[in-house]
Each structure stands twice: as C-alpha cells, then as structure tokens.
Amino acid sequence: MAEIIVVTSGKGGVGKTTTSASIACGLARRGKRVAVVDFDIGLRNLDLIMGCERRVVYDFVNVIQGDCTLKQALIKDKRLETLYVLAASQTRDKDALSSEGVRRVLDELANDGFDYIICDSPAGIEKGAHLAMYFADRAVVVVNPEISSVRDSDRILGLLASKTQRAEQGQERVREHLLLTRYNPRRVTTGEMLSVDDVKEILGLDVIGVVPESPDVLSASNAGLPVIMNEDSDASRAYEDAVARLLGEEVPLRFTLDAKKGFFARMFGG
Amino acid sequence: MSTDLDFRDKRSTADARPAVVKLQYGQIGMMQLRIGTTDTGALLDELTGRVATAPKFFQRTPVCLDLGELERLPEIDEVRAVIDAVRRAGMVSIGLAGGSADIETLSTALNLPVLSAFRAANNPFPAVNPVATAPVQPAPPVAVMAATAEAPLAAMIHSQTVRSGQRIYARDRDLVITAGVGAGAEVMADGCVHIYGSLRGRAMAGVHGKLSARVFCQEFNAELVSIAGIFRVFETIPRELVGKPVQAWLDGEDLHFAPVGN
C-alpha cells in the first residue's frame, strides 16, 4: 500500500523542494520504492534539484492529459535504483491540474508498487497546493524559524485538517509532521530566530527534524544532487534523521544547540 | 472578513466546471458605529483618535452605521456627511442599523442596505417582557444564564488546535476549546468562550449581545477579545497578563481583563 506524503509550507522559499528531494532520496536509499512528484506547475524546480532536468521529456500535465503514459513520464534516478521523478510542466499553469487527473496518476503510481509517493507542493494555498495535499496520508510541513513562516504553516495545518480527502470523507486525520529548516542555533541564542521549542509551542506539534542552515544546501542544489547525498554535511545528517523518524525510528535531535567555539578555533578562526 | 478558503476545484471529482455563482450563508463579525452626533468635525476627531490606537485593525474596516442614539432622525445630507467622515477616518460604512420605517426610507435614498439584526442583537433585554428582565440585571452572571436559558444547550467542545484562518462558532451555547487558538484564528460563541490552551487569535463571546458572556483562556496572547460587540485589540498586551490564565468580562460598556485562578 503506497503512502502519499505531501511536503508543504504555505510560504515560499522555505525549502520544500530541497526537503522533497532529500526525503525521497533518503527513503529510496533504504530500499523503498519512491516516486517524487512536482506539483509546482509552471515553476518546476524539482528536476533541477534532482539533477535530471535534461532528461525531462514528458511531464505530469502530459500524463494527466493523456499525451503519454505514466511510464514514459517517470524519470529514473541515476544514483538510486528505486527512485523516480515526475516533473512538473514548465509551459503550463496550475489550472492544467485537475482533481480527477491527479487522483488517476496517484492511483496508478500506487498500483505500480511504489511504497512512497512524495508530493512536492507549490507555495501558496491555491489550487496547486490544494491538489498536492488533497490525497495525502501524511504531511511534512516545512517551516523556517521566523514568525511569518510559522503563521503560514499554521494556516496550512488548518487546511490539512479540513480541506483534504481524509477530512472531507471523515477518515482518520492526515498525520502532520513539522520539519524546521534553515535553523541557526547561534541566531536562536541571540534571540533573532525562534527556537525549536517556540515553534513547537506555537504550532502545537512535535518536530520530525531540524535542518541547520548550511551552505551545503545551495551548493547541492547547484550541483543537482539532493543535499542528503552529501554525507559530509550536517544538513544531510539532519535529513537522514528526519527520514528515520518518518519511518517510526526514535532518533535524538541534533544540530539544535549553539556549538561554542573552542579556544583554538576562536584564536585561529577555525 | 470571511477567512475560510473556498477552493474552486473542490467538487471537481463530480463536476470539473467551477460554479458561476455560489450563494452561501455566512456569518460575518462586523463593527457597529453608533453615533451620538452628526457633527462631522467631532466625529472625525473621535474616530481618528480611535483608529490611531490600532491603525491596521481599522484600515478599511466595514462598519454598520447606527443612528438610533441620535435625538432626531438626520437629514439625508447629514448622513452623507457622516459617511464621508467615517470614510476619511479610514473605515467604510456598508449599511445602516435598522428597524424603523424612517431608516428604511433613508437607506433607500442612500442606496445602502439595512442590517436589521444589529439593533436586535444589541438590545439584550427586549421590552416585550419587562417584568421578567428587570430583576435580572443586578443578579450575578450565573443567575442571569439560569433565568434566561429556556432550554440550555450543552457547550460545544472542540479538541483540536484552531489554526490560522479557521473559525469556530458555537451558536446559542458556550464554546470550550481544549487546545490552542492560533494567531489569525477566530473562535466565537453566543455564550462564553473557554480556551484551555493558548489564545493567540481572536475570541468573541456573546456575539448576539449576551452581556454576561465571558472569555476565559489558559494562556493569554490574544489579538482581539470581544464581548457582546465591545472589543479590545491588543497591539501590546499588558505585561501582567501575557501568557497568564485570564478572563474577560463586561462591566457596563467597559471590557475588563484580569488573571484568573492563582
């Protein structure tokens, strides 16, 4: 039975696509069959982050409109055997998505034996974001430790509780998980950023991961290699932990404390 | 002010075409502006003073104009001048609080709707039965509820966090929320509002004019609290109330706040 996980946030630029790509890779690395679907029609990015932008022939909208089969549109990842990408269309807009079409594609992916379908939501709360979350079983809400992002996430959590198929049909609630990204413990200490506990308290949810602010994220995007694949990076380890927690493992939180520089590091600028 | 989103494609599984028109009944909280004079200078002074206390809150806020406190029915031109003064203060008059035939005539001439619920809502002791209501006023709030509730309804209990953009309304009863109310969320009841969590959004008790309604919360961080239409916005919360268990009640026209419990 495939599990549909939407990665959403409301606010733009908080790291939804980076998170989608890393979670998809993390799950695939553990042997799960994973399809990651870009719902950001017209502003497609996932293919860039996944490093498969030159292999996009058919996209999500083509499949919905019957221009090609799902198999033709799924792009197999070069690094991980069990990972596939369904790119968004760059030349259309979000109106090209229909609820019925999305349902058909997700059903077909589930029937193809995928374990996880990761839906990378566009920013906002309009049609694209709505359809990305509508069929979800679980949601990863990506939030930056600042008030506007927290407010938008609160809004998204409200929609997850009311405007999804599970809510409308009175089924069990969508399971919600918070993922903090761009976390900078030093700025939390100085009071410029909300702490993990602040965000947990405001949103009333536990966090599934805290990804530290890291230059590795940008360089990973530029290289078309999801940051989780860069084993030397703290961001990678944090995503790896988040994937473990998503699978029900208990892992202690890391990268949330301001690592005081040692004497030598301070002296020599290390 | 209706904040609930309506995705156009919501029903598209059955019918892919978006509806041309969707006529829905919705409850909208709105401010009522009761004027005691048609002197536009005085009105403008008073209004701009009020607006300055919370400029964002009042910006383009719709108000319902209530002429009931005036000594005589104003002329059309006077009302026009008042509407203009209100507009210059940053608010928008979208209707007249009504009831009488004179108001109807005025509203037709001004091309504004009459919002009749307002007068009834703010007239909690109807003159129909003065014998029954007279002794009620000095009695403690609990007694008022017992005396006026004909068939008391059990409180509405909501156990999930009320998120930004959501609204919960308990009609003809109390509302009990066993979780938090997020910033930008609204909880309303015709009776009292009890929040066993943090209140960061708006809480409105006695929305149909029940003066004895109260708001209680476990952790006070509210944006706005209103009882029977009398409200206070918090751009800065008094330090002694921040994060505390607080109750709000009405004493005449004054909204009071105080820590509750220990």
Image (cartoon, coloured by chain):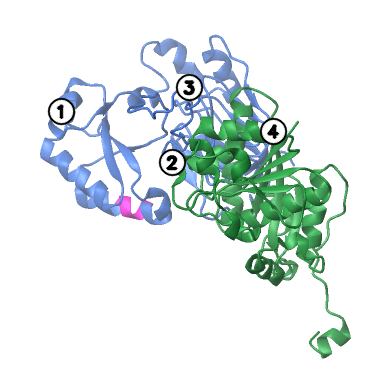
Chain colours: A green, B blue
Q: Is residue A233 left or right of residue B185?
A: right
* Residue at numbered disc 2: A95
Q: Chain of mark 2?
A: A
Q: Is residue B49 left or right of residue A193?
A: left
Q: Amino acid at mark 3?
A: Ala
Q: Chain of mark 1?
A: B
Q: Quadrant of the N terminus of chain B?
A: top left
> For the residues carrying marks 1 and 4, which lies nearer the camera in this image?
4
Local crowd size for mark 1, using a 10 Å CA cut-off: few (<14), some (14–19), many (≥20):
few
Q: Secondary structure at mark 3?
A: loop
> Which label sits on residue B108?
1
Q: Where B58 sits versus A138, above or below?
A: below
Marks 1/4: CA–CA distance: 61 Å
> Which label sits on residue B14?
3
Local crowd size for mark 3, using a 10 Å CA cut-off: few (<14), some (14–19), many (≥20):
few
Which residue is nearer to you in this view: B36 or B191?
B191
Q: Amino acid at mark 2?
A: Asp
Q: Amino acid at mark 4?
A: Ala
Local crowd size for mark 2, using a 10 Å CA cut-off: few (<14), some (14–19), many (≥20):
few
| Residue A253 in sight | yes
Marks 4/3: CA–CA distance: 22 Å
Q: Secondary structure at mark 4?
A: helix
Residue B182 found in image quarter? top right
Q: Which residues are magenta?
A: B46-50
* Residue at numbered disc 4: A110
Residue B168 found in image quarter? top right
Q: Residue at x 76, y 38 (%)?
A: A115
Q: Chain of mark 3?
A: B
